[in-house]
Image: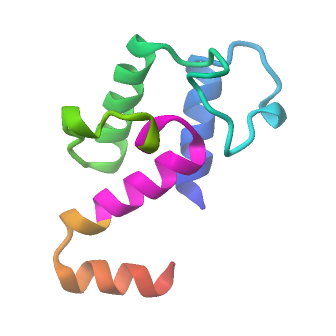
Amino acid sequence: MQLKSDVRQYIIENFYYGQDDHTLDDHISFLQNGIIDSTGVLELVSFLQEKYDILIHDDEMIPENLDSINNIEVFVTRKMNRERSPSEAHAQGSHG
């Protein structure tokens, strides 16, 4: 999915300095592996909000939503579907 690719590229360019992108698996915890710190989470949130035209609330800034590429994909997809009208969300889900 393009979302995973975009997020991976952002992480590599901004936090994974000089590392081989093949070592950044989709399930790797950013926090546990020292890839992103608390300030980095805020930068990541800003990127996601701008890139995907979503609003991420403070109570949504938790590891379950933002601590890996897989978590981000699920979270952002869910946010995008919620913020569309029900008919758009349904149409998007059927192509998915």
Indicate how the structure is coloured in the image: rainbow
Q: Is residue 34 above or below residue 68?
A: above
Image x and y of residue 81, in percent: 30, 68
Is 4 left or right of 52, judged from the image as shown? Answer: right
Q: Nearer the viewer, residue 76 or 67?
A: 67
Is 62 left or right of 18, judged from the image as shown? Answer: left
Q: Is residue 60 above or below residue 80?
A: above
Q: Which residues are magenta?
A: 65-80
Residue occupying the point 23% across, 66% down: 82
Q: Is residue 33 magenta?
A: no
Image quarter in which the N terminus is found: bottom right
Is 22 left or right of 38, judged from the image as shown? Answer: right
Image x and y of residue 52, in percent: 34, 49
Q: Is residue 44 above or below residue 96?
A: above
Image x and y of residue 39, in percent: 39, 12
Residue occupying the point 48% across, 84% down: 95
Quarter residue 23 falls in: top right
Q: Nearer the viewer, residue 73 or 17?
A: 73
Q: Is residue 70 magenta?
A: yes
